[in-house]
């Protein structure tokens, strides 16, 4: 009996040890980390892809004019304020006309005097002409001498010269009178175009000197259409083409886009701090008046674009000797290589022209993994 009891005790001990070993193995296997490699994935999505050339720029009216004074004098009246809407031909300001009115009156008086002298000289000429004709008739009848005939001819020619001289003086005075009248008219300053008064440089009572340069009184601009002047670096200017689409946002509204087409690239660069920049210009409508002069803009020239394209993260596209391909996660979790034809890429997303459809789950290599876009997830490599 003792021997049988000892063997039974040994078997029980061995069984307990086996069960403990199995339990430990199971626990370790359960808590051990999964050694299978985890990969980043993303789903192919339909979106627009744009290849952009970026720049900063300024807004200014396409059409504007500096209204200046063409004559010197004191600014007597200023009839508009900044922000006023004006029509072409509207009176804007007046310069004191006193001095110019006196010049007009002086020229008018001088002209009247010269016209009186002209009438006198013409009468003298007519008298000398008649005398010369009479001397010629007498000479034909041998009733006068050759000397008297020549004297009469000379007197007539002298009278004609005096008439011509006073007529020339009258022409000169008339020219001076027209200039004086024009200058007098310049004291009334009218709007050369319709638009908005965007700045006023002079004040009522200020003396304007137009002797050397034309002093600016105010500036009128048509704000219904604005020009964006974007400064593009010399590294990017070769990527621009006239007529290409472009849009911009403003510092105060980064969500709204204003669209246009590139109209002009100025050939002469602007050099700032040894950086060579070229001005690229395009226009946008401003019917609502939300765009203001000198606003800072963020400009985006669209060098290439794909609209409503199936896209994947650019990092998901890999290449070998045969071309481009992506790794696609199948429904059973396995991976397969799919050849694709790629289109436009903005270095973040790449358009897929053929090979996969929207919704396909593609692998992003670990070296290029980034935070997942919408529709992405994590998969397991089997």
Image: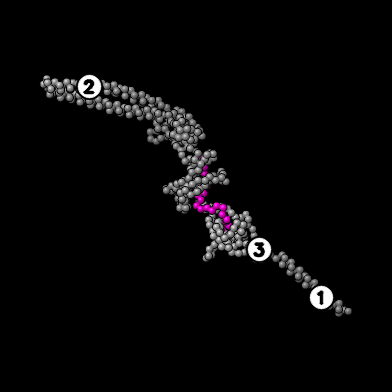
Identify the element where label 3 is drawn: loop
Ranked by sequence position, the earlier of labels 3 and 1 is 1
Q: Residue at x 61, y 62 (%)?
A: 328
Q: Residue 138: x, y in percent?
A: 14, 20
Q: Identify the disc placed on residue 332.
A: 3
Above or below for 262 versus 202: below
For the N terminus, the quadrant is: bottom right
From the image, tell me which residue sits under label 1.
11
Q: Nearer the viewer, residue 327 or 205?
A: 327
Q: Which region is colored magenta?
A: 292-314
Ranked by sequence position, the earlier of labels 2 and 3 is 2
Is residue 71 left or right of 54 when viewed as pictured?
A: left
Q: Residue at x 31, y 22 (%)?
A: 112
Callout 2–callout 1 Cβ contact below 8 Å: no
Q: Identify the disc placed on residue 243.
A: none
Q: How is the image coloured?
A: one colour
């Amino acid at each position: 009996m003792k021997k049988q009891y000892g063997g039974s005790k040994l078997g029980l001990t061995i069984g307990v040890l086996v069960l403990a070993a199995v339990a430990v193995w199971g626990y370790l296997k359960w808590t051990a980390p999964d050694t299978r490699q985890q990969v980043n994935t993303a789903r192919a999505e339909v979106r627009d892809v744009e290849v952009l050339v970026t720049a900063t720029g300024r807004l200014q009216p396409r059409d504007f004019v500096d209204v200046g004074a063409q004559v010197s004098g004191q600014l007597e009246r200023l009839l508009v304020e900044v922000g006023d809407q004006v029509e072409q031909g509207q009176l804007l300001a007046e310069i004191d006309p006193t001095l110019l009115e006196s010049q007009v009156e002086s020229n008018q008086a001088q002209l009247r005097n010269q016209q009186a002298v002209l009438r006198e000289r013409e009468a003298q000429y007519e008298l000398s002409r008649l005398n010369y004709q009479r001397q010629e008739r007498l000479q034909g009848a041998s009733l006068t001498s050759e000397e008297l005939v020549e004297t009469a001819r000379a007197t007539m020619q002298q009278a004609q010269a005096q008439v011509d001289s006073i007529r020339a003086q009258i022409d000169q005075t008339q020219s001076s009178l027209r200039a004086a009248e024009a200058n007098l008219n310049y004291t009334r300053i009218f709007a050369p175009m319709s638009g908005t008064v965007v700045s006023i440089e002079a004040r009522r009572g200020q003396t304007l000197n137009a002797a050397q340069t034309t002093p600016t009184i105010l500036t009128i601009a048509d704000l219904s259409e604005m020009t964006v002047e974007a400064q593009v670096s010399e590294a990017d200017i070769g990527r621009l083409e006239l007529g290409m689409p472009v849009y911009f946002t403003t510092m105060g509204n980064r969500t709204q886009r204003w669209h246009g087409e590139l109209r002009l690239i100025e050939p002469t660069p602007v050099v700032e701090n040894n950086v060579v920049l070229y001005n690229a210009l395009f226009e946008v409508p401003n019917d609502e008046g939300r765009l203001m002069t000198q606003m800072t803009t963020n400009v985006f020239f669209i060098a290439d674009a794909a609209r409503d394209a199936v896209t994947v993260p650019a990092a998901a596209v890999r290449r070998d000797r045969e071309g481009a391909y992506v790794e696609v996660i199948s429904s059973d979790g396995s991976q397969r290589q799919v050849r694709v034809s790629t289109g436009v890429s903005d270095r973040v997303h790449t358009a897929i022209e053929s090979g996969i459809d929207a919704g396909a789950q593609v692998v992003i290599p670990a070296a290029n993994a980034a935070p997942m876009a919408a529709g992405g997830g994590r998969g397991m490599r089997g």
